[in-house]
Image: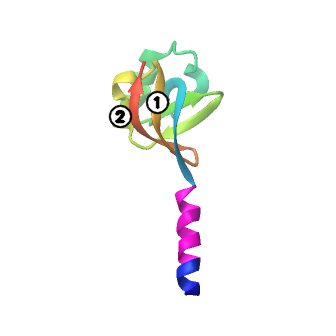
């Protein structure tokens, strides 16, 4: 019984480490990061992604990694609203809208 209680409390702890939400910001790249927070670097972001950088979301002065970069490939350099799940400093994107 003690094992079951400990297992349940550990599972509950991990269930609360990630949370769903919505963030407004700019899709940038891991090379330039917050440099393109104003949305003015669309060509630069696209170029950096082509060279191997990862897509990131710049929101409220923070740079958040994007786990599934293909979800934002049509919005590189754009100001967007992202819906998804945040786990630490990484978002798994469910939807993107401009």
Residue highlighted by disc 2: 71
Q: Which residue is at 44% across, 35% downward?
A: 53
Where residue 93 appears, x then y in whole percent? 42, 38
The correct choice, above or below, for 45 with respect to 4 in the image is: above
Give the crowd class for mark 1: few <14, some 14-19, many >=20 residues within 10 Å. many
Q: Which mark is residue 30?
A: none
User: What secondary structure characterizes most of the magenta part?
Assistant: helix
Residue 49 in view of the camera = yes
Q: Earlier in the sequence, mark 2 or mark 1?
A: 2
Give the crowd class for mark 2: few <14, some 14-19, many >=20 residues within 10 Å. some
Q: Residue furthest bottom?
A: 1
Q: Is residue 75 left or right of residue 10?
A: left
Q: Which residue is at 51% across, 34% downward?
A: 30
Instruction: Determine contact: label 2, label 1, CB under 8 Å.
Output: no
The Cα atoms of the two marked residues, 2 and 1, are separated by 10 Å
Q: Residue furthest front?
A: 1
Q: Which mark is residue 82?
A: 1
């Amino acid at each position: 019984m003690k094992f079951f209680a400990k297992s349940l409390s550990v599972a509950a702890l991990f269930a609360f480490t990630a949370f769903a939400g919505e963030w407004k910001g700019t899709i940038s790249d891991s090379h330039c990061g917050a440099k393109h927070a104003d949305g003015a670097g669309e060509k630069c972001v696209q170029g950096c992604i082509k060279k191997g950088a990862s897509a990131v979301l710049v929101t409220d002065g923070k740079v958040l990694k994007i786990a599934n970069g293909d979800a934002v490939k049509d919005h590189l350099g754009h100001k967007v609203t992202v819906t998804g799940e945040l786990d630490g400093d990484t978002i798994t994107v469910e939807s993107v809208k401009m």
